[in-house]
Image (cartoon, helix red, strand yellow):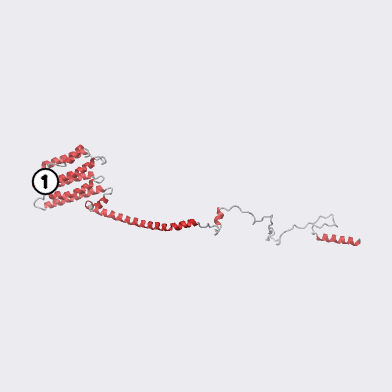
Amino acid sequence: MTWLRRLSRDRASKGDQDLPTGAMPSRFNTNQEVQQSPPFKDTQYSSDFNSHDKLQSYRPSTAGDQGYNATPRGPITSGEDSHRPITSAMEPTPDPLTKAFNDAIRPYQDQIEELKNKLEDTTYQLQQLEDERADMHAWIDKRGLRADVPPSIAQAMNGEPTSAQTLNYQLDRKMTVLNHDLHRLQDSLSSHLPTATFATTLAQLIPSIEDLSQLPGGPPLAFELIIKLGGNLNSHGGDEGWNNEADASSRADFYTRLDDSMLDVVRARLAPNSREDPPWSVARDVKRLEKTGQFLRSKLGLQSYFPRSLEVMKRGEEV
């Protein structure tokens, strides 16, 4: 049995040697404190000041321990999304229906673009024509030729707001020039010109005066021009001219023509929609015409002076 006890002691000694030094109890000194080893460091780096021994060493995460890489991230904000690169996977796939629609309307879009270009060119050319027409109208008015232009040009010029005033000024100026030319012609001759020559020359202005009466604001201006035109005829001829039957007949025909034009002007002025500002003082013009008629009858032998126009003016109504 001795060898059994020896084997037991050898095994017990071997088991004590396998224990750590700080953890092995002393069997010989029980009164001393047990020395403990320094805390265990799980690091393979040195313990100097610049070392990383204060950091925990990397340990592979297990199934139950979630590391940094396994931490779930929150939803992506708009700021994060703007800085993230756009990959081909994020691009939407082209819509076949939209692509087919764009391909179908592309020819029409080209046609629309071509029509837009043509419209711009036409607008530019139209503006050039408008500028040229304005320059032509200014040139005509500067030379006092509005009364002599063709009807197509006159119609375009009469659409201006001040067309009546402009035409009245030019007709008045032309009437003055004609009257001066007739007086100069008469002075250059030894005998007086026939009244028919004066009447025919001055009667050329009657159609233009009638056109003036058709313009807005034109009837009052035409009324005065007709009276002035008759007075220009009265200023020509001598005593023998008034006693001539041919001259008296020519003068009567001329005033009959003037009375026809004056009648239309009076009707236009008496119309309810005339809207003259200030309103027409009919009684004053009636006295004016009657006084002039009495003078021509006593001095020049003229028997009638706007008889029908005076009758309408006295009634003060539209015929």
Q: Is residue 7 above or below residue 209?
A: below
Residue 30, image quadrant? bottom right
What residue do we see at 89% from left, 61% from top? 4
Q: Between 51 and 198, which is closer to the camera in this rendering?
A: 198
What residue do we see at 24% from left, 53% from top? 140
Q: Position of residue 65 (x, y in %)?
A: 68, 55
- Residue 179 appears anywhere in the view: no
Residue tagged by mark 1?
249
Q: Position of residue 273 (x, y in %)?
A: 27, 41
- Quadrant, the C terminus: top left
Q: Between 158 and 239, which is closer to the camera in this rendering?
A: 158
| Number of marks in picture | 1
29 vs 81, left or right, is: right
In the displayed image of the protein, which residue is found farthest to the right? 1
Residue 311, image quadrant? top left
**Local SS, label 1:** helix
Tell me the crowding category of disc 1: few under 14, some 14 to 19, or many 20 or more residues within 10 angstroms, Cα based.
few
Residue 221, image quadrant? top left
114 vs 168, left or right, is: right
Q: Is residue 251 above or below residue 16?
A: above
In the displayed image of the protein, which residue is found farthest to the top? 315
Q: Is residue 248 above or below residue 96?
A: above
What residue do we see at 26% from left, 55% from top? 136
- Residue 311 appears anywhere in the view: yes
Q: Between 22 and 102, which is closer to the camera in this rendering?
A: 102
- Quadrant, the N terminus: bottom right
Instruction: Say what amino acid the circle numbered 1 marks.
Output: Ser
Q: Position of residue 209 (x, y in %)?
A: 21, 47
